Image: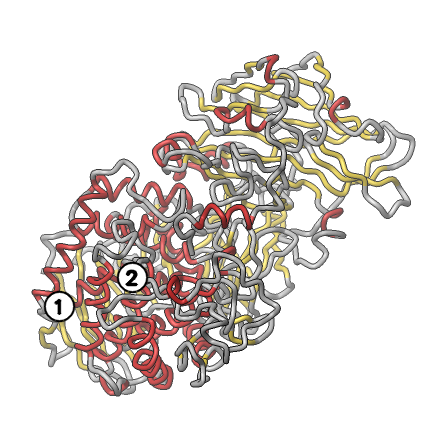
Amino acid sequence: MSFYGSQAILACIVIFATLLSSVVGQSDSLGLKNGYITINTANFKAQIVRDAQVLASLSPAGGTFDFLPFDLISARAGNGQYHWGDITFRYRKEGSSSWTDGSSAATRKPVTSLKAGTGALAASNLAPTLPTTGPLNVTREWLDVSGDLGLRFTIENSGDSPIEIGSLGFPAEFNSIFTNRAATDTQRLCSLSDPYVGMHAGYIRANPVRGTGAALVVTPLGDTPLEAYRNLAEPSYAATGYGSQTFEGFYEWQVLSRAWAENEWAGAKPWNTPSSRTLQPGQTLQFGVRFSVAPGGVRDLDSAVRKTGTPVAFGVPGYIIPRGSPSQLFLQADSDVASIASDPVGSLAVAALSETSYSITPASTFWGRAKLTVNYADGKIQTIHYYVTKPAADTLGDLGRFLTTEQWYNDTSDPFGRAPSVMSYDYETRSIVTQDPRVWIAGLSDEGGVGAYLAATAKQAIQPDAEEVSKLEAFIDQVLWPTVQTEDFAVKKSIFYYDPSGLPQYSYSSDIDWTSWTSWNEDSAYAIDRAYDYVHVAAAYWSLYRVARAYPSLVKTHDWEWYLNQAYRTVIRGMQNDVGYNRLGLMGETVFGEILTDLTREGLTSAASALTTSMRSRARQWDSEEVPYGSEMAWDSTGQEGVYYWAKYFGLTDTATKTVNSVLGYMPTVPHWGWNGNARRYWDNIYGGKLKRIERQIHHYGSGLNALVLLSAFRSDPADTYLLQVGYGGASGPLSNINEAGFASASFHSWPATLRWDGYSGDYGPGFLGLALGSGTYVARHETFGLLAYGGALLSGTGDDDDDGSVVTVRTTGPVSRRIFVGPLGVTVTVDAGSVSSFRYEEAGGSVSLTLTQPPEAPKAAAAILWVEANDAAAEYRVSAPSGVTSERLGWRIPLIASGDVVVELTKS
């Protein structure tokens, strides 16, 4: 969801009123007027503020990119604004139940400089800037750690009784401030960061927004586990807009978190077990972090982490695991593994495959969050965070049933014409959202209102169900086509609106505040000027086209030609001049490419030509722009998908490459299900969630959509397995949103006081569309870990023991079993019906064999169309078996049987 024109300004004021400070100007509490101290190392150019001795600037040696907002330091010099080098804590004396807070940023005073010891670049005592009373004596040192920059705190109990430290945090500041910047300046100056909350193996990774150039990693220095990652409250000023769409805000590395877990976080399940440390009188503790450069950029981050002696984990296919789907874990560390335990006990079974690799198998009945705790012989602890779902097909089955039963709205007396339809749902109240002040959520349009029906229709394209298709046909005939759309294929922004005088018979809830700009009247709701809305409608039609083409007996009201024509004409209507934003990349518009492909396959040359012309015009514009990822927002992670698709399609290589890098700039990979492949989104809960706030969202729709970019790029360059690791993590994200009952939440709340799924289904659908269009079974050859399968299980061909690796056999296990990619061959195979249960390939000769089947409970197709795409333009494949195969729709028509397997042999010529 996005801002709407000039109303955006009012929205910001309303939403963030509690955050905005009434202070007109900011004081210089840091002491900037007294200058800076340079603390360079072999790998860094750095400056600290002379008076406060907090970090102001950090650039790789020999480079100009600054990971910190040094250009805005004067706007971040007030009390309560955090920087690297600050410290927060909570402590209590022995026998006390209440905690005392401390922060070096709350009321700043110049710190006391100390003589730097061996290896120290600067040292200070923080007493002047900490609470005046208290038993903790804190000193801070900036260190040269083998050419890296180190930050170390020494905490002493100077009192006469034991002290329990229940919270200890190091605020982490990066230049993620987009406020008042042009898009080109944001790309040039800004960086994004993400945590791996993995205890002694934990780290914070940061990289330029543009996704290229050296990256940065912050790792533990000594015994400094990353136990929790806490959001920081700061005052907000107009110059930076803390806690807004242009400035998400900052977090801190928490070494100890028990004091928060006992209070503000008491209702949440933390990532790691909260802990505290007790200091006896006169005793000291040291904690710190180390800043290291990854010269090769994001792909070099794991290597940079390992060079610090920090353990590294690499999970395949990631950390979201459907039951029945195998997973591998590779560990790299300086010390041997002493033990591995799962939490909850028995949730994950671990079996050693070698000294450094393990198989991870979910328990047959477990579902939800799980954690592996790895204890190393040197005392380090690493936690690896997983999310276990039901088997992929069962998860999709649950989703389809829930959407078309619990979320099925059939009140035909509804004055807005919303019945019958699949509508937004509130899982916390177990009810359909028929009213919301953000009218689109109840109005079957915009991302926040289409999430339900878009997921329901897209699900049919990969796993159709007769009863669900029947209901969705009714929805399309009675609501989508006659009400959401106009007769000329335009798409309304909402069919629910606020008009109590015009609809006196309708009972608008008196518990809702209808005075916001979001409570549109009929004219505003019926506006047809938002191009993003056309994608959802076109995707719904296309999904039913795919069903009608492969399973014609399932559709009753229209044939495949009608659905494909509806999809095509909706896209073309969305490109007309009275529709805004259509010169931008649109969320989910990869489906436009699928529509074009199917028009071409069907021989509908006139329509295909018109659609090609329309898309080429946009792509040429993007190719001329330095930053082609425009949006309704000041910065966004939505335009890249469309820009990439058409840049690649039309051979605009530079723009395609630039776009892949952009996605890698906001889409990390870490050993945590929540952040692995999690495309950066932090404002959409305001527009589509139940709990409305600015925060880093976990597996919002950006994960599934941006995965399309990376998986497509990987298919073009299968040697770049980093693309697959990140992309498959994103494509798996939408599985985790689906709970045991089948309800799909819009996103997971990452703030440690919450750590739960949002109550609304909201804008889940676009992410699921990304899963449907991009997921499959991918085979890759990793330069370190060898042959790997994502969304499948390697049954032979690994080269182990008596297996010479000449023929590789793979069983598919992912949510999309109609698409396979064989990386070593550079070959993609897709089918439109049934499923690929397994396949094998022979690398030397390039042959591929697929086993097609029709699941017992699934509808039965008479045949499947099979398509082959090879990266090598000179490579041609033909179907050599079975007999009875004919050419159709630029592919091969493979007869299927209702029960049993059909083996298809593909021969390379």
- The structure residue drawn at horizontal position 58% and vertical position 19%, both measured from the top left corner, is 48
Residue situated in front as seen by the camera: 745 or 818: 745
Residue situated in front as seen by the camera: 764 or 80: 80
Residue identified by numbered label 2: 808
Looking at the image, can residue 119 be seen? no
Q: Which mark is residue 601?
A: 1
Structural distance between the alpha carbons of marks 1 and 2: 31 Å
Q: Residues within 10 Å of mark 2 (few under 14, many from 20)?
A: many
- The structure residue drawn at horizontal position 13% and vertical position 68%, both measured from the top left corner, is 601
- The structure residue drawn at horizontal position 75% and vertical position 26%, both measured from the top left corner, is 138
On the picture, is 524 further left or further right than 620?
right
- Looking at the figure, which quarter contains the N terminus? bottom left
Looking at the image, can residue 116 be seen? yes
Secondary structure under tag 2 reads: strand
How many discs appear?
A: 2
Residue situated in front as seen by the camera: 591 or 425: 425
**Residue 433 percent location from the top left of the image:** 51, 72
